Amino acid sequence: MMKRKFTMTLLCASMIAMTGCNDDETIYKPDPNIESKLQKLTDENGALTTRNSQLTTTNSQLLENNQRLTTEVNDLKNSPTIQAHDFISQCKIIGTDFDFVNPNADVNEVNTAAIQTLAVSTDCKSCHGASNPPPHADYGDCKNCHEGHADAPEPELPTGGPTLPTFAQPAFLPGVIDGKTGASGSTFYTPGSYLNAQWLYRQLNAQFHIYRWKEVSTGGVIKLEEACQLAQRQHMVDMFPNDGKAYEIEHKNNAIGAKSIATVNKFQEDGKAVETPNIATFGYGLKEIDGAYFVTMNIGKGNTCHNIIMNGEARLSYYEYDPAQVEKTGLAIPSRNRGARIIAKTDYERTGLLSADWATAVPGLGVGETFKPEDVKWEDVGACNLMLKIENIIPLG
């Protein structure tokens, strides 16, 4: 009996050792799905931490590169690798961009001609200033302006080709001397001659525009940044001096061709009548009145004025020359020689003779007062407002 009790006691002790002393205690076992999700989140968090570290490093590198590039840009502005070569590039370096506009670009074309036909300037004050000789010294008084910029609207597009004659052309065999007209017959220059009065009017009154920097004592701009904002900046080619002095943009106009006037000097020498040729260069213009064409000049008293009044006529030349061209002449192709010759008679009604002030008409000799050459007392004359009616337009030659 005792042996049986001892055996039960050992069995009981063994059970307690295996299960514990508390019959109600339960061992926790986590859900495998939850453990899997937790592991996934842990892995993702580690990846994000690694990516964040990489982005932080990249951002630091970008900040360093940005600082380096900023320094390089500032260095280029102060000492550019490519130096400015004109005003546009000069402004571009400091961040002001604009396109150049050629003020002398062709406005219209005739056939395939490379003819520069520019707008006529109507700004009287563009050439009338106190620093200029008479009649330009009459600043702002546009009544005495030269034809070509005083009350001269831009002409309409001419009708017909530039070589289509407005006047009947002298016709004779080559080599025949024609002292009356001075024409040269059929010449190489006919294809390059403005025989059409409308075209000659347009070319002769056209203006070549020049823009340049002018140093001024008052006004103007000193800094390049200011110069790059000026009106008419788009026409500038020359670089801004940028030397600490004040400048403005000066605009000037010039004719695109040379204009010459031929008259005859008549005088007595040793009791004999003598005649000599007289050549002068003046900026004359053309004017159309009721379908007729006139040469206009406002010049000082001299041989040309005296001869035009006393002889009643003149011969004039208009000449455009381009030494860069290979072809001798022609309007349908780029060429060296273009122009025309003009035969004109003095219009004594539309002509006026002025006193030394270039403004006051000599009594009886003003515009609208028809007079004769013998009526003129030259000691009273200081200037001449001349009008010559065109009798013919003939080729160069």
Image (cartoon, rainbow, N blue to C red):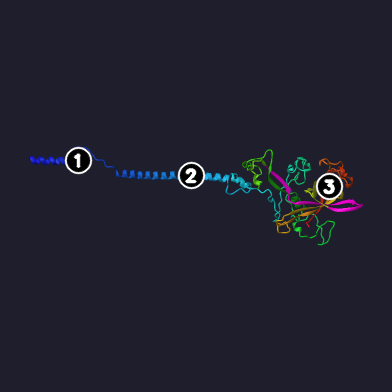
Residue 215 point in image, percent of width and height: 68, 42
Residue 161 position (above or below residue 121): below
Amino acid type, residue under disc 2 in the picture = Glu
* Magenta highlight: main SS: strand
Distance of mark 1 from mark 3, alpha carbons? 143 Å
Residue 341 point in image, percent of width and height: 79, 54
Amino acid type, residue under disc 3 in the picture = Gly
Closer to the observer: label 2 or label 1? 2
Residue 187 position (above or below residue 151): below
The mark that comes first in sequence, 2 or 1, is 1
Residue found at the very far left of the displayed protein: 1
Task: Report the quarter where the N terminus lies.
Answer: top left
What is the magenta range?
248-277
The mark that comes first in sequence, 1 or 3, is 1
Task: Report the quarter where the C terminus lies.
Answer: bottom right
Residue tagged 1: 19
Look at the numbered discs 1 and 3 and tell me whether their residues touch, using CB distance below 8 Å.
no
